[in-house]
Amino acid sequence: PMPYYFYDLFFFLMIRRPPRSTLFPYTTLFRSASLEWSVDEIGKFLDQFPNASVDLTERIPHLQYQSLEDRNRVRDFFVKYQDRITYGTDFEDEDHDTAELKERMHARWSRDWKYFNTEEMMTVPELDTPIQGLGLTKAVVDKIYRVNAEKLFKDAWEVPTQLDRKSTRLN
């Protein structure tokens, strides 16, 4: 993995680009810019750079913490920027225990899904206080979980048709 200071350098260089520049493949703002502590600040960035997108990798607990204070502000952020947010998580299989890893992945995905899709009260490991889910619409959640990723990574969804025997690469 890239050291965190490289993410900060990337972010610094990126904000020096013209606001309408498209970044490849996209900006992992929640991660690299360290703005996850404020949806207002992330919103300011997205307004200033209309072609930038953000992902949620490992930053959902920060959003959940903000929703303790002002759930509607966090919900409104997701509705407003629904076309520019992509769901993601990080997992490491340090012990090479596939069953345990699958269990952790399913638990995380289920908690995140519940937070975005329902208005139920729930507990999360990172917070001592129960939080209420955001209750986003299916259309918004579909964009965050799938549609935006399909747009950002267009080639990732194509199925290879044949094997190039000389290079052993899929074409």
Image: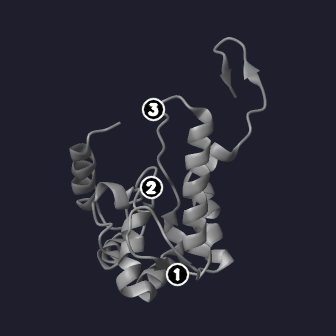
Please indicate whether residue 149 sits to the left or right of residue 9 in the image: right
Name the residue tied to disc 2.
57
Above or below residue 94? Residue 21 is below
User: Which numbered circle lies on residue 94?
Assistant: 3
Residue 17 coordinates in the image, percent (x, y): 28, 59
Please indicate whether residue 111 sits to the left or right of residue 72 in the image: right
What residue is at 31 percent from the left and 54 percent from the top?
32
Q: Earlier in the sequence, mark 3 or mark 1?
A: 1
The residue lying toward the viewer, choosing from 60 and 151, is: 60
Q: Amino acid at mark 3?
A: Glu
Name the residue tied to disc 1.
79
Q: Is residue 53 visible?
A: no
Residue 48 coordinates in the image, percent (x, y): 32, 74
Disc 3 secondary structure class: loop
Above or below residue 114? Residue 92 is above
Q: Earlier in the sequence, mark 2 or mark 3?
A: 2
Query: Residue 83 occupies which quadrant of the picture?
Result: bottom right
Q: Is residue 40 visible?
A: yes
Disc 1 secondary structure class: helix
Q: What is the crowding at mark 1: few (fewer than 14 residues within 10 Å), some, or many (at least 20)?
A: some
Q: Amino acid at mark 2?
A: Thr
Q: Nearer the viewer, mark 2 or mark 3?
A: 3
The residue lying toward the viewer, choosing from 7 and 137, is: 137
| Residue furthest to the right | 161
Q: CA distance from mark 2 to mark 1?
A: 18 Å
User: Which numbered circle lies on residue 53?
Assistant: none
